[in-house]
Amino acid sequence: MTIEQMYMENIMDHFKSPRNYGKLDKPTITHHDNNPLCGDELTFQLIIHEGKVSDVKFMGHGCAISQASASMLTEKIKGVSVEDVKKLTKEDIFEMLGIPLSPVRMKCALLSLQVLTAGVAKYSYQL
Amino acid sequence: MDVRKDFPILKRKIHGKELVYLDNAATTQKPQVVLDAERDYYTNHNANIHRGVYVLSEEATNLYEKAHEKASHFINADFQEVVFTRNTTESLNLLAYSYSVWDLQKGDEIVLSRLEHHSNLVPWQQLAQLKGVTVKFIELENDGSLDMESAKKLIGKKTKIVSIAHMSNALGTINDVRELGKMAHSVNAVMIVDGAQSVPHFSVDVKKLDCDFLAFSAHKMYGPTGMGCLYGKKDLLENMKPFLYGGEMIREVSYEHTRFNDLPWKFEAGTSNIAGAIGLGAAVDYVSSLGMESIEEYEKELLMYGTKKLSAIPGLTLIGTSKKKGGIISFDMKGIPPHDMASILDADGICVRAGHHCAMPLMNHLGIHGTCRASFGIYNTKKEIDRLAESIEKAKKIFKV
Ligand SMILES: Cc1ncc(COP(=O)(O)O)c(C=O)c1O
């Protein structure tokens, strides 16, 4: 693995122009968490309509990997059912990013999934 | 300095490249003499200390007490004035418990600064909540040095403790702890110096500083982990209650009462880190043989070279530019988050640290999320700084900034 492979074109693109970045008006779900190791922070907001993610936005700061991962994940889950969102795994995230990651940087990559699934779990629990 | 041959780890290759170790503020590498000292103890002299009458125990006791002698001599303290702990953090916690829990009253004040390491903040903050005392913070100048006017204002009649880092691990600033000590003493407060970053890098003499307490860690001065020191003026240590209770720290025990041991053993409960102490002794011998003045001078040269080299890189901002600085360069590269920078440097075999450097309140205060930090030790070279600069340029290419 070379370091250039980790910072591939699409990762840099999502980092520099994050998709779905910002706040939602009346979110059904808001969840925030951080990665104490790197200081990455992410907040996910979702609107759930008829069991599906009808809109999603994220905010945060931190390393390129954590922020690109969040941006790509918002694209991936828009229009997807809550049940399917719950089924997302680490492997799905690694596949989505498509880059080699050291164990330390995997934590950065997985923060997005962690925040998302914790938010969705909190929502499902309240139902 | 011609010392690279003393450190076996420097022969290692990382990702196929020669290791460039620039995270010395976190921990330093260990010279062969320190490794040998610990190994020799375990191989030839291992026994518990102080109570055995057999040869091995006598040898181990001798080695351990020799380490005490070396450590106290190193900072110009008396034998009884240096207590072995696990690290700086434990030394500071010892003070928060043994000195402060008993001696502070509601309404008293503790004065720290805005740039303290979590180790010199959290114990006081928690103690403050427990005892109803107030913690105040000396403000910073723009260059990351302490605002001494702010110190004058804050240190007053209610102040009981002033506890300040001798050198900041996040910014590199060297603080005038002698002057702060004078202010503290003028209001009958004690002066605590967090020497984690100073003791390894320049000569620290507790008599000249006239501090009441000084804490430092062996692992940041080419010694082993799990080994630290607390210096305290004898009359203060004598009047303090022990921190941990148990074996070793006692003189006489009945079911009802205990008479505590003499200094420094009163503060060393349980079986000590004997090998670690011996390793610390070897580290003290090692840096002393190089000379603390030479170490200071050499690292200053690296700092000057590195500062010039890095500040010439467009987009790079130095965080912490005090005139009085040790060998630490904290920086921000526009458009590249610190952790990505550190990953890219790692790919070239260069170890730096990224993040808040255990000073989250300081980072918030400065309005940043973290920095990248290169910190120097005796084995670093200008060539390594050149490699660092080249690698930063490479990161800029990858991030197109
Ligand atoms: C200024 C300062 N104080 C305290 C500490 C804590 O040292 P230790 O982790 O060895 O207890 C450090 C270590 O990073 C430091 O740099």
Image (cartoon, grey):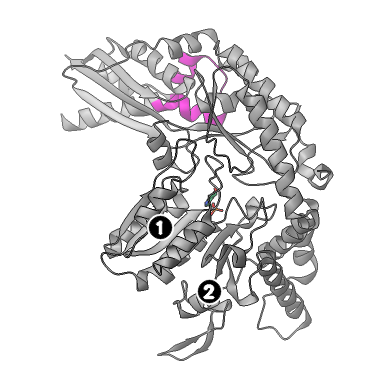
User: Which amino acid, mark 1?
Assistant: Pro
Circle 2 residue: B267
Graded by Cα atoms within 10 Å as few (under 14), some (14 to 19) or many (20 or more), the crowding at tag 2 reads many
Q: x, y percentage for residue B285?
A: 77, 61
Query: Does the rendering let one see residue B269?
Result: no
Task: Name the element at disc 1.
Answer: helix
Measure how far apart labels 1 and 2 are at the Cα level: 18 Å
**In this picture, is A69 found above or below B292?**
above
Q: Toward which corner of the image does residue A18 lie, by quadrant?
A: top left
Q: x, y percentage for residue A15?
A: 45, 14
**In this picture, is A50 found above or below B209?**
above
Circle 1 residue: B123
Label 1 close to label 2 by CB (< 8 Å): no
**In this picture, is A119 found above or below B10?**
above
* Residue located 71% across and 29% down the image: B385
User: Which amino acid, mark 2?
Assistant: Phe
Q: x, y percentage for residue A55?
A: 24, 12
Q: Tell me the number on the disc at residue B397.
A: none
For label 2, being within 8 Å of ligand 1 is answered no
| Residue B168 or residue B44, whichever sits in front | B168
Of callouts 1 and 2, the N-terminal one: 1
Q: Are marks 1 and 2 on the same chain?
A: yes
Q: Chain of mark 1?
A: B
